[in-house]
Amino acid sequence: MIGIDEEKCNQCNLCYQVCIGGPIFKGPEIKSDPDLLCIECGHCYAICPESAITLKGYEDFEPYELTEKPPVDGPSLMKLLRGRRSGRIYKPEPVSREHLLEIIEAASLAPSAHNGYQTKAYVYQDEEMISRIRDVTIQFYKRLLRIFNAPGFSLAWRLIGQDPDELDVHKYAFEGLWTSSKNEDILFYNSKTILAFTAPAHNAMALGDAWIMAQNAVNYAEAIKVATVYNGFIIQAASYDSRVRAAMRIPKGEKVVAVLNLGYPKYDFAREAPRRIMDISWM
């Protein structure tokens, strides 16, 4: 519920202008029409120059006051993005709860369709649970590899329009999970902290929200010297194997959208890695 303090309000109507399809009308005036949807985006609260807007349920909220100058300029942010690497070599200690709370708060600040925020975060730091997730995930890929190696599968793969070379890449990657001579734990790289984001399985917009939130988490983690790497193996396994979801304690109806290995980096990179700018079509 939105409220307006009439004594503070200067009738600038900025709240009306930023309220898209909601209950604030020119005046400003709050209308209680049930057909008017307030998604609690908070734009009216954030833009009011006189702090005249109140939001029910957020009475104890203490806002960060914005200034004309952005707290991070473009060149500084670009340096952070250029320097971010997927980190797989960690110090032995798990990421602290303080840093995890900050990372999840950063994720929570990402845009959400209709301001729905139907995503959830799961933090794994129990060594036995992480080991269990590792075991059932590897068993999933062993079963999948047997299917990929079955007679006639490569032909079926080509008939459905898939790249034959990509099949070989998958086989190599799957087998490497348990036969790698370079690292004993290709799945988690001995990370002591795993962070997963879920969303309702049949809500396409919420699934997109979870990806955006995960990337917010990645970028903030980089700023506080916490290394991250997306764990696609877990994402795929959890999508198809209920045993993996059970090991992760993901309730029925939730889809695992993004999984991150986290840790304090053991080494620092000296420079950015080369990247090509994506193709652009100017219309």
Image (spheres, rainbow, N blue to C red):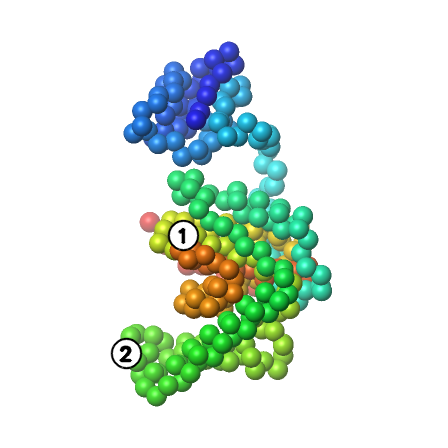
Vertical order, 163 against 29 (above or below):
below
Q: Where residue 38 is drawn, which disc sits there?
A: none
Q: Front-most of 144 and 91?
A: 144
Residue located 38% across and 20% down the image:
30
Look at the numbered disc 1 and give the secondary structure of its residue: strand
Label located before the other in sequence (2 or 1): 2
Counting the numbered discs, the total is 2
Circle 1 residues within 10 Å: few <14, some 14–19, many ≥20: some
Asked if the residues shown at circle 2 and circle 1 are in contact, with their CB atoms under 8 angstroms apart, the answer is: no
Q: Position of residue 159 (x, y in %)?
A: 28, 78
> Is 263 positioned to the left or the right of 48 in the image?
right
x, y (%) of residue 59? 55, 27
Location of residue 31 by image quarter: top left
Q: Is residue 263 visible?
A: yes
Q: Amino acid at mark 2?
A: Leu
| In-front residue for pair 132/160 | 132
In the rendered view, does 161 fall on the left or right side of 61? Answer: left
What residue is shown at x 51% (from left), y 72% (from top)? 136
- Secondary structure beneath dot 2 equals helix
Amino acid marked by disc 1? Pro
Could you say which quadrant of the image residue 60 lies in?
top right
Q: Is residue 40 left or right of residue 193?
A: left
Q: Which residue is mark 2?
A: 159
**Residue 235 seen in the figure:** no
Q: Nearer the viewer, residue 197 or 276?
A: 197
| Mark 2 Cα shell of 10 Å, populated few (<14), some (14-19), many (≥20) | few
Residue hosting label 1: 200
Q: Quadrant of residue 168?
A: bottom left
